[in-house]
Image (cartoon, rainbow, N blue to C red):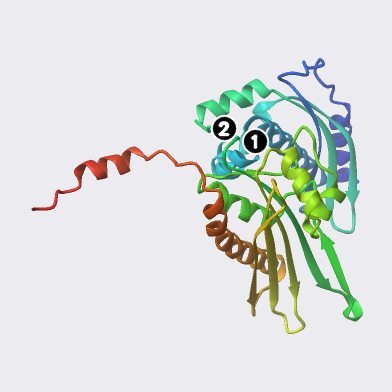
Amino acid sequence: MIRHRLWTLALAALLAAPASAPAAPGNKPRFQVNGTAVILHKNRARAMDRAVDAGLRRAVYQALLQSLGEASMIQFRGRIEGALLKEARQYVQSYRVLGYELATGSRTVKVKLEVVVDLSAVDEAVRALQLAKVEKGEARLLFLIEEQIIRSGLGGRKTTTRLGPDKIGTAERRMMYAFARIGYTPVNPRGQREPARPGQIHAAISGDVDAAQALGSLYGCPFVITAMATVERERGGAVVSLASARVIRTEDGAVIAIRSRQVRYRRARGRRGYRNALVSASSRLARSLIPEIRRVFPPPPRPASRGSRRRRRRAPRRRQ
């Protein structure tokens, strides 16, 4: 009873917390986000705090996405998570809880927040970390990727879970990172001023070249990579992942390359097994596509580092 009262008081305090004065729409945008946390040791009040923290991190992530763009977010993911997202509260001007959901069966609490992020503070932190925005232009590649997990349920029935178009999946993250690290600028319909309809994206992935061309033209990308990544557990317990992709030239709809890669893990347990299989298959797929795209659309030259210039200067001369 005492714990229930403490939970009620903590929840009332969160819901009643007043938001700050309305922020200017320019440098202090509002985000509506969700945050989820697991209830540990029956401490629902603490779980609510962690859910709020998760929601605030998500809001700051969205603000960073607006400031840096998706390509830079992928390239600097480690530094962003370590230096910025862990301290998300200091970039939040105000927030208020719009609602909550207590899932007793799964022992989780979910909150819906409206968060006002101080974008000027975010930009200042980005400058301090020297995270350069990836310039858009010469080497833009549009990625349209669907991901699905097939699981076996009771009676041998299989259920398919498809990742929504508003979320970035494991395969998409690995493929975009592989291209970003060698100088390309990955582009995704999410976060764009004119987001594509999910049906249009699905049509392009399913083989509609006209849809792929239209999206490539919309986002200024000379080439479009459409891909499907599937992972499934076999009866014997092994996990199999298949990743397939096509590279389409926006100008004339020509298919430059078609590739697929499959991996199989005999001993793979839980969700980690699914993720590892997706990572491996998509990484191999990206490596197989890179030479084909480089051949027709090379990335811009990257400036040499100081260390490499010093090594070239100090290289001994060969004797005549």
The residue that label 2 is drawn on is: 133
Structural distance between the alpha carbons of marks 2 and 1: 7 Å
Amino acid identity at mark 1: Gly
State whether residue 158 is above or below residue 48. below
Name the image quarter holding residue 304: top left
Along the line of sight, the residue nearer the viewer: 258 or 174: 258
Q: Which mark is residue 69?
A: 1
- 66 sits left or right of 289 in the view: right
- 145 sits left or right of 256 in the view: right
Within 10 Å of the Cα at label 2, are there few (<14), some (14-19), or many (20+) other Cα atoms? some
Tell me the SS state at disc 2: loop
Q: Position of residue 24 (x, y in %)?
A: 77, 15
Confirm or deny contact between disc 2 and disc 1 (CB under 8 A): yes
Amino acid identity at mark 2: Lys
Tell me the SS state at disc 1: loop
Q: Earlier along the polypeptide chain: callout 2 or callout 1?
A: 1
